[in-house]
Amino acid sequence: MKEIIRAAVAILIICGVLFYVNNQLDKSSGRSGSDTISVYNWGEYIDPELVERFEEETGITVVYETFDSNEAMMTKIEQGGTSYDVAMPSEYAIEKMKENDLLIPIDHSKVPNLSNIDPYFLDLPFDPGNEYSIPYFWGTVGIAFNPKLLDGQTFESWEDLWDPSLKQEVILVDGAREVMGMGLNTLGYSLNTKDEQQLQEATDKLKTLSPNIKAIIGDEIVETMRRSEAAVALVWSGQAADIMYVNEDIDYAVPKEGSNLWFDNMIIPKTAANVEGAHKFINFMLDPEVAAQNADYVGYSTPNEQAIELMDPEVTGDERFYPTEEMRERLEVYKNLGLETLGKYNELFLEFKMDAQ
Amino acid sequence: MNRSSKLSKVYLALVFIILYTPIFYLIFYSFNSGGTMSSFKSFSLEHYKAVFADTRLIMILINTIIIALLSALISTAIGVIGAIGIVYLKNRKSRNALLSLNNVLIVSPDVIIGASFLILFTMVGVKLGFASVLISHIAFSVPIVVIMVLPKLQEMSSTLIDAALDLGASKREVLSRVIIPYIKPGIFAGFFLALTYSLDDFAVTFFVTGNGFTTLSVEIYSMARAGITLTINALSGLLFIVTLLLVLGYYFVTNRTKNPLRTGVPK
Amino acid sequence: MQNNTNRSYYLVPYFGWMMLFVIAPLVLVIYFSLFDLHGNFSFINYQNFFTSVYLKLTLSSFWYAFLITAFTLAIAYPTAYWLTKTKHKQLWLLLIIIPSWINLLLKTYAFIGIFGVKGPLNKLFESMGIGTQQILYTDFSFIFVSVYIFIPFMILPIFNSLDKMNPTLIDAARDLGSSTWTTFTKVIFPLTINGVKSGIQAVFIPSLSLFMITRLIAGNKVITLGTAIEQQFLVTRNWGMGSTIAVFLIMFMVIIMILTGQKDKGALSNEQIK
């Protein structure tokens, strides 16, 4: 008994000391200012230097929190109890959040830097007139492949994934929309289809890919491809950029049948406590110099025209990551399918995964 | 005897090597000047410098440790009491029912626990942050403590307690002088595994946290999309070394004071 | 009786915990499971559970949970047994637990590296002349990593049961001429049965709902009920179906508890002697 009490007391003392240390750190980092905004973003999806610069320029303290999926983020904002002022969800999440009345309209007069954004990325179907969202980064879905592991094979068509020589070589990203979309695109259908017949056909088509599938994984694709562990992977362009940053052998292609065009955007959730500060932050991130530095750090494609001017032309001239307008014609943005159809997509995807075992 | 002791040493060595391999792998790459765990470029301490330069990360680490220690401590107290309560239930059916309820949180996936706790907290009006995270960690650690303490309680023969009671010990004395000392290994096992639960948890914490409060797990998981930095490796390496030193230090200090008593027992 | 009131007073925190964090969420989950996507009351989710996909998932979840538990036990028991024979056994035991305090996702990433085609393990295989093997995304890697995660949960209770065992019992059995094996099966193992049971509970039950490892290490070639629930909650946002699967998962757990509880003679006989 004595030993247990002694251990308990020791733990309490340690906690007390740690509390004190944390408080001191908190004070010294000056995070307890009165004017704060809370930013909710994917991990490692912003250059921390820019956050510091924003704090210095405006005197607003930034509390930075992270999430790992759109859906989890939405659940948090929906339930309340928190006060996020700015968040960076993907476009299909914005549609849902709009439906559920979770967003505050953005006052364009407070975001003059909006004019820096390429008009192509404004006024998109998921948010007409950019009432609620401002583009942050964008990209495509395509195939990352390692020519060194393949005999000169290229991927101009989704059909190329079905090549018998790729036995156990293909990695898919674990996303129902992405994989089902690939199946639909291969057959020439829209990746927003609600037609059950087309969905079933796509599933049957996908099932014939089973022998080629090595794994269906998430963000670990990046590490796997970097190590040249697999020859081919279905990825988001951002992941492809991350892979190529380390492994220069890898190439990336968007097949000719078409694919998905995605956006991550800045929004102000209903929970915001400092709407004024949120506008300042969004405007700051749209500054050409800031956006360029951020794009350099994160490695994704920026929609900021003026920033592109400031960046290395070798990066921004790369048509794999900055496709021309003509190439973008073939791409589709995800539409909110509604819970029922989304459920159908997931069910068929699960069926496909079970089949791939 | 000799052969079996050799075999046992080889076996244990193997188990320990496997347990520590991934950790040494992580530490090895924390010295990589390249930014990733895929190819080792050259030796560098830059990631360790980055750890000390990042106050936010250090604060998150301290939060994580405080939550882990406190939640393990409190859940151990609750769990021990619960286990004692369960064992001394007369009715076997209600004992089984209680044990089943006890294990509900172990079988429930974290997403469900997290979502339902979040609903609970917002309904009651608890401000999301340190308190809600601490309470949640206590909540999901209690069952593992119960499971760890139960076998010791079941092994304890009731004659021991009866004898103590016959000798005039009060209920309280029985608890503190007989029961608790006997189940002490179970209590420590429960505490350590509650620590493990707390340090590993991502999903529940994610849902119930807010207002700037984060733990290391949440931070690491949300980094996955853009790639986990080697700073985290360096941090984990440091944490591992410090823990190891603390454990070794504590063990040898307490053992030196105890040794004279122990060596008196002939083998 | 003074004794009784005294006892229930001690139990307040535990039952308070149970009401707030077990019963309340349980009621919530059952409530959610009774609504379809449009918020209408219906049993459609329960009906859907009995489609082939979910039944198949249930079977495969149980099969893998069984395999994981069996291997964990097979590895943990000798470890715990020999640990009790070492000189600084408490220290060694702590050293078993320490690795579990390093973040799981990080360790999993380490395993991805170690098991990879170009990883150190395959380098070793090559130097031994076995040749490169695909280790990642197989049943083997999945079970290996799961066992790795769960091993402390099995070793601790078994160690505790073995540790305080009266050595004279074993000596007595030996003196009576029983072989090492008989001593083990007839004397040692039955005395540690409670510890083993605790270990099995601490491993089997959570491995029914494993989800992260199924993707990271098994590449979704293993899918469990936990994966399905996670998908329903986070991707489809169909909380009704997710809750329904959870209800079944909890029911399966209760059945296991009742089945293993029946053999719970050890504690019972104590009570009966009273």
Image (cartoon, coloured by chain):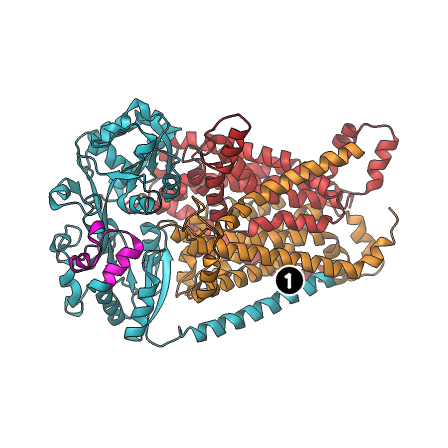
Chain colours: A cyan, B orange, C red
Q: Nearer the viewer, residue A59 or C46?
A: A59
Principal SS element in the magenta part?
helix
Q: Residue furthest top?
A: A164
Q: Is residue A51 visible?
A: yes
Left/right placement of residue B215 relative to residue C95 reads: left
Q: Quadrant of the N terminus of chain A?
A: bottom right
Q: Quadrant of residue B13?
A: top right
Q: Position of residue C40 (x, y in %)?
A: 30, 45
Left/right placement of residue A295 relative to residue A350 reads: left
Q: Nearer the viewer, residue B218 or C7?
A: B218
Q: Is residue A1 visible?
A: no
Q: Which residues are magenta?
A: A290-314
Please tell me whether residue A303 belongs to the stretch shown in magenta: yes
Q: Position of residue C79 (x, y in %)?
A: 67, 39
Which residue lies under the disc numbered 1? C9
Q: Quadrant of the C terminus of chain A?
A: top left
Q: Tag 1, which secondary structure?
A: helix
Please tell me whether residue C188 belongs to the stretch shown in magenta: no
Q: Is residue A12 above or below residue C77?
A: below
Chain letter for mark 1: C
